[in-house]
Image (spheres, rainbow, N blue to C red):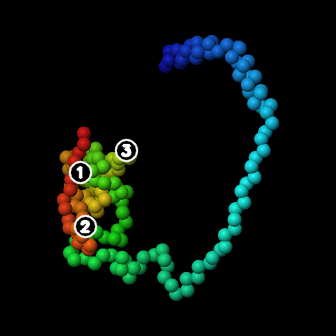
Amino acid sequence: MRLAAWTGTLALGAALTGCGQADLDELRGYVEGVKARAPGALEPIPEVPLVDTFVYEPGNRRDPFVMDDRTARATMPQQTTGVAPDPLRRREELEQYALDSLRMVGTLERNDTRWALVTTPDGVLHPVRVGNYLGTNNGQITQISPEGIALTEIVGEGPGTWREREARLSLKQ
């Protein structure tokens, strides 16, 4: 450790010997010239126009930011089959990526639970387990093995028509 510190000190000393006094005098002269300049005038802050205020009086109206059962049924497409994604389910982080853009890089087990390690295109590592969702087609993880992740996707086949299909994300080495 002392040898490394001693070597670093010698290297720094050798580098500084190349700086001559004439170079420093020139630099000092430039700095003094910049400091001697008169400061420029600042532009005035732009005036912000006033906005008329509005107070919302809900009265007996519903809250527009809360989805009630009637609104949820109205926005949900009419189903002709028993399979459909849940429109009220909160989407998970990895559902914003296409399945083929995700990479499984390994597995780990903890407390009798097997986790898969999945990376996103921007290099962020996410642990997932059975029951989590992946991909843009409502893919729910059904099994995790050391070789890959098995999932069931729900894909649309037309207005109000859905079907399940099996998909797989294999381990990339």
Residues 96 and 13: in front is 96
Residues 151 and 2: in front is 151
105 left or right, relative to 33: left
Q: Earlier in the sequence, mark 2 or mark 3?
A: 3
112 left or right, relative to 66: left
Q: CA distance from mark 3 to mark 1?
A: 17 Å
Residue 8: percent from left, percent from top: 54, 17
Find out whether the residues at labels 2 and 3 contact each other: C-beta distance under 8 Å.
no
- Seen at 49% across and 79% down, the residue is 63
For mark 2, give the secondary structure. Answer: strand
Q: Earlier in the sequence, mark 1 or mark 2?
A: 2
Q: Earlier in the sequence, mark 3 or mark 1?
A: 3
Q: CA distance from mark 2 to mark 3?
A: 30 Å
Please tell me whether residue 126 is drawn above or below residue 166 in the rendered image. Answer: above
Residues 134 and 132: in front is 134
Residue 43: percent from left, percent from top: 74, 49
For mark 1, give the secondary structure. Answer: strand
Residue at the spot of label 3: 123
